[in-house]
Amino acid sequence: MRALFSFLYGVAAYVAFNAALLYFIGFSGNLLVPKSVDVGASAPWVEALGTDLLLLTLFGVQHSVMARRGFKRWWTRVVPAVVERSTYVVATCAVLALMFWFWVPIEAPVVWHVDHRAGVALLWGLFGLGWLVALVSTFLINHFELFGLHQVFARLTQRALPEAQFRTPLLYRYVRHPLYVGFLLTFWSVPVMTAGRLLFALGFTVYILIGIAFEERDLLQQFGERYRTYREQVGMLIPHPRSPRRAAGDGSGPKDA
């Protein structure tokens, strides 16, 4: 019965995250949602800046702290290990919901405004490409494990989870963090960059850079010399000017958390 409840909880968490992700896409691009980065009730810029910075900080702290191995060791004393990842997903949904609800637009000044049709099409194309790269990256490592479904399904079917492996499939042969490359493309590829949109992009960029530092520290502890060699051969976010076949080695590499 506990295994069934864990599975249903994991499925609900996965569905909730997909709904939050779809809204996040619209929120970040001012597309088809009632409230977004640049759409909503305004406030004095000091209040807006303080509120938005607090929301970005809350997301960064939750998303980074709960992903750390040390926190997970403590956290699994509170929640069953099988739903640890699903609970992380639920917490992420909650923080995103707070951001969607409380974010205050900062419209002026406009940093850039691209009017040329070709330029607009290019930027929206990069925006869409970024989300595609991010999605593909999750499937390259293990999409369903990343979002907790693999764990709860294994418990339901009484199967043991395989040990974490060191892999570099496809995009991971060119950059160490293609998932974050996709996010950065989406955050910066918009034809109208308002002050609020700039704060949003800068905040998530800073979070990504800090998150990478913590993540790679964990990967070094987990995989040791193999990850150190991989890090020397493959660029973090920009490919090194060398053969990807040589950088990939024997085809094994990390799984981002």
Image: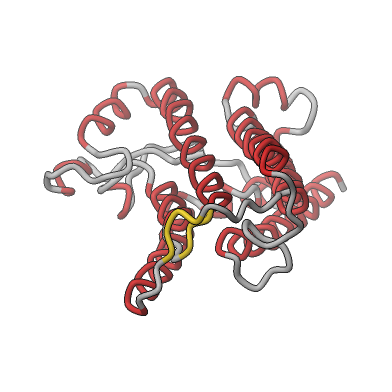
Looking at the image, which residue sits at the far bottom? 117
Indicate the position of residue 152 as horizontal and vertical percent values.
Answer: 70, 48
Indicate the position of residue 5 as horizontal and vertical percent values.
Answer: 84, 49
Indicate the position of residue 122 as horizontal and vertical percent values.
Answer: 35, 71
Q: Is 104 in front, or is 63?
A: 104
Check the image and report above or below for 78 versus 82.
above
Say which residue appears at 76% left-offset and 47% top-offset. Answer: 98
Say which residue appears at 65% left-offset and 39% top-offset. Answer: 49
Q: How many dots with numbers?
A: 0
User: In this orientation, does residue 13 appear?
Assistant: yes
Residue 106 as seen in the image, left or right of residue 240: right
Indicate the position of residue 198 as horizontal and vertical percent values.
Answer: 50, 48
Q: Is 75 in front, or is 166?
A: 75
Residue 246 as seen in the image, left or right of residue 9: left
Say which residue appears at 76% left-offset and 48% top-offset. Answer: 102
Residue 144 as seen in the image, left or right of residue 176: right
Say which residue appears at 70% left-offset and 48% top-offset. Answer: 96
Quadrant in the picture for residue 166 = top left
User: In this orientation, does residue 83 appear?
Assistant: no
Check the image and report above or below for 171 versus 212.
below
Residue 228 as seen in the image, left or right of residue 220: left
Q: Is 80 in front, or is 26?
A: 26
Q: How is the image coloured?
A: secondary structure
Quadrant in the picture for residue 32 = bottom right
Looking at the image, which residue sits at the far right? 1
Q: Is 63 in front, or is 14?
A: 63
